[in-house]
Image (tube, rainbow, N blue to C red):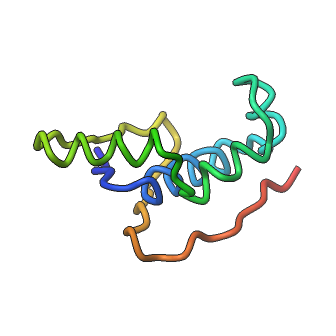
Amino acid sequence: MLPIKSPRALGSVLRETRTALRIPAEDLAAMVHTSHVTLSRLEQGKATAAIDTLFALLDELGIELNVSLPPGVGPIAPLDANAKPRRTRVKP
């Protein structure tokens, strides 16, 4: 289980998992009915007001958010809140 304490940490886990599963960003965006721009923003940890509020609520209530990775993916170390996201592409 990986602890997720920020939008950036969540974004890095999303990106690392997507690339480990070899799913192109455009395909994943289509699968969840969003744009590749929205997916990119999430993977970069660019918080929306709703995501910032969610993490503030989790912190205030003492709730710890953890994720489990799918089989075949791992290990992933989520970014801390101050780290710059890595740019990764899935090679076809």
Tally of numbered tags:
0
The answer to which image quadrant residue 32 occupies is top right
Q: Residue at x 66, y 52 (%)?
A: 41
In this rendering, would 24 be left or right of 85? right
Q: Furthest residue to the right?
A: 92
x and y percentages locating residue 44 in the rendered image: 60, 59
The answer to which image quadrant residue 30 occupies is top right
x and y percentages locating residue 76 in the rendered image: 44, 57
The answer to which image quadrant residue 27 occupies is top right
Q: Nearer the viewer, residue 8 or 18?
A: 8
Q: Residue at x 34, y 39 (%)?
A: 54
Query: Could you tell me which quadrant the N terminus lies in?
Result: top left
Q: Nearer the viewer, residue 26 or 19?
A: 26
x and y percentages locating residue 24 in the rendered image: 80, 44
In this rendering, would 55 be left or right of 48? left
Q: Residue at x 70, y 51 (%)?
A: 40
Q: Residue at x 19, y 48 (%)?
A: 59
Q: Furthest residue to the front?
A: 49
Q: Furthest residue to the bottom?
A: 83
In this rendering, would 50 be left or right of 39? left
